[in-house]
Amino acid sequence: MGVSLVVLVVLSVLQVAVLSYVNPPFTVMTALDWIRSGGVVEPTIPHHGWRQLREISPHIRKAVLAGEDQRFLSHNGFDFEEINEAVKDIVLQKGYRGASTVTMQAARTVFLWPDRSLVRKILEAYYTVLVEIFWDKRRILEIYLNTVDWGEGVMGVEAASRRYFHVSSQLVTQSQAALLAAILPSPHRWSPTHPNEQVLRRQRRILKDMEKMPLVS
């Protein structure tokens, strides 16, 4: 048991360390899709090619941080201020709000399966720590933007930009970027091209908050 645990730890550390320099060829979800399809669907990401951070519109970089993780550069993977606010909302019965950072989302997208079990949560925290140790903030944001789920069959910023606005992610405008970021909490229910009032409210807030967001480059 002890030896097996050591081996798993070593393998996971190597796994994260390698991706500091090598783009992930697939995520756990794309691998699962490949298995379910009997090998028909290639488990590769993303569909329109990997985009380095400098090739992605600065508007998108700022909008995603404004909408998903405003303290991205100051925390070490866990935003305890946001976690505290989320717990308060639950206690006061104001509803559930996510407190996942960009680092946490990148860790679970690349390395883990979709689940709400305690085991998955523990592994998510573990991989989040490893990611913060081995990847710098630029690399974290780059991997996040290239692997994030942006709707049915839409993985990564380039696929989302082309699907919704018919342009490269390098050419997305400020308004379009805010719409893309606005749907991230629920990309399979919300649309940036047919936004409901909730999405439009989020877009307005994100546009305002983008002004104070740093440009990770």
Image (tube, helix red, strand yellow):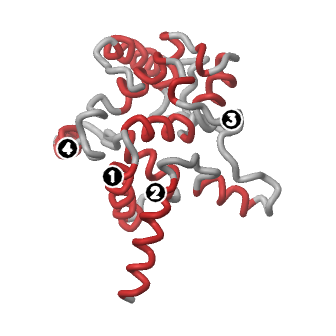
**What label sits on residue 80 in the rendered view?**
4
**Which mark is first along the chain, 3 or 4?**
3
Q: Which one is closest to the eye, mark 4 or mark 3?
A: 3
Q: In the image, is 137 to the left or to the right of 73?
A: right
The amino acid on which the numbered mark 2 sits, given as a three-letter code, is Val
Where does label 3 land, which residue? 49
The amino acid on which the numbered mark 3 sits, given as a three-letter code, is Gly
Observer-nearest residue: 63 or 61? 61
The amino acid on which the numbered mark 1 sits, given as a three-letter code, is Ile
Where residue 80 sits: x, y (%)?
20, 44
Where residue 36 sits: x, y (%)?
73, 61
**What label sits on residue 16 in the rendered view?**
2
Observer-nearest residue: 17 or 104? 17
Q: Which one is closest to the eye, mark 1 or mark 4?
A: 1
Mark 1 burial class by Cα count in 10 Å: few <14, some 14-19, many 20+: some
Observer-nearest residue: 112 or 44? 44
The residue lying at 57 percent from left, 23 percent from top is 55
As drawn, 37 above or below 70: below
The residue lying at 42 percent from left, 58 percent from top is 116
**What label sits on residue 133 in the rendered view?**
1
Where residue 196 sits: x, y (%)?
51, 19
Q: In the image, is 216 to the left or to the right of 30?
A: left
Q: Distance between the residues labelled 4 and 3?
A: 34 Å
Quadrant in the rendering for residue 189: top right
Q: What element does badge 1 sit on?
A: helix
